[in-house]
Image: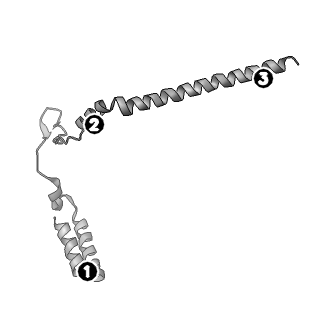
Amino acid sequence: MNDEPTKAANTGLRLAFLGIVVIGLFSALFGRMWFLQVLATEEFRVQAETNQVRLVTVPPTRGRILDRNGEILADNVFTGEWGRQWHGLIPHSTWDAFDDAAHFLQDTHGPRIAEIVLAYAAG
């Protein structure tokens, strides 16, 4: 029964220690936040000014394809912009689908929308 006052004293001591640790951690957190917001403002402003997006055009090279004798089977050749080469890349059945869609839209929404779809398909 003599342990009751000792346990209560130990519990109070532990809670006080825990409170001091929590206050210390929050003080460190707020001190760091203050440092970053107030003291290091100039350094971070300079970093933000130099941290900008820079677009770099890199040609898409896939490398040469050689056969077992070292003869070139496929080489890197720049052919221009891909976006306007629709007719050679899309199968004929896809053009039929564009045509069918244009006729359907012409029946439901009028001839102007069909012209737009066909103009888009033509590139």
Residue at coordinates 11% horizontally, 44% vertically from top-left? 77
**Quick one: label 2, few (<14), some, or many (20+) residues within 10 Å?**
few
Question: Image quarter for residue 39?
Answer: top left
Judge by depth and name the residue closer to the eye, 61 or 116: 116
Residue at coordinates 28% horizontally, 80% vertically from top-left? 109
- Badge count: 3
Between marks 1 and 3, how big is the CA–CA gap?
87 Å
What amino acid is labelled 2 in the image?
Ala
**Callout in the foreground (2, 3):** 3
* In the image: residue 2, left or right of residue 102: right
Check disc 3 and report its element: helix, strand or loop: helix
**Callout in the foreground (2, 1):** 2
**Quick one: label 3, few (<14), some, or many (20+) residues within 10 Å?**
few
Judging by the rendered image, the residue that carries numbered circle 2 is: 48
Question: Image quarter for residue 21?
Answer: top right
Dot label at residue 106: 1
**Quick one: label 1, few (<14), some, or many (20+) residues within 10 Å?**
some
Q: Please provide percent x and percent y for residue 25.
A: 53, 27
Between marks 2 and 3, how big is the CA–CA gap?
55 Å
Figure check: 41 above or below 101: above
What amino acid is labelled 1 in the image?
Gln
* Quarter that holds the C terminus: bottom left
Q: Please provide percent x and percent y for residue 66.
A: 16, 36
Check disc 2 and report its element: helix, strand or loop: helix
Judging by the rendered image, the residue that carries numbered circle 3 is: 8
Between marks 2 and 1, how big is the CA–CA gap?
53 Å
First in residue order: circle 2 vs circle 1? 2
In the picture as drawn, the residue positioned furthest to the front comes out as 38
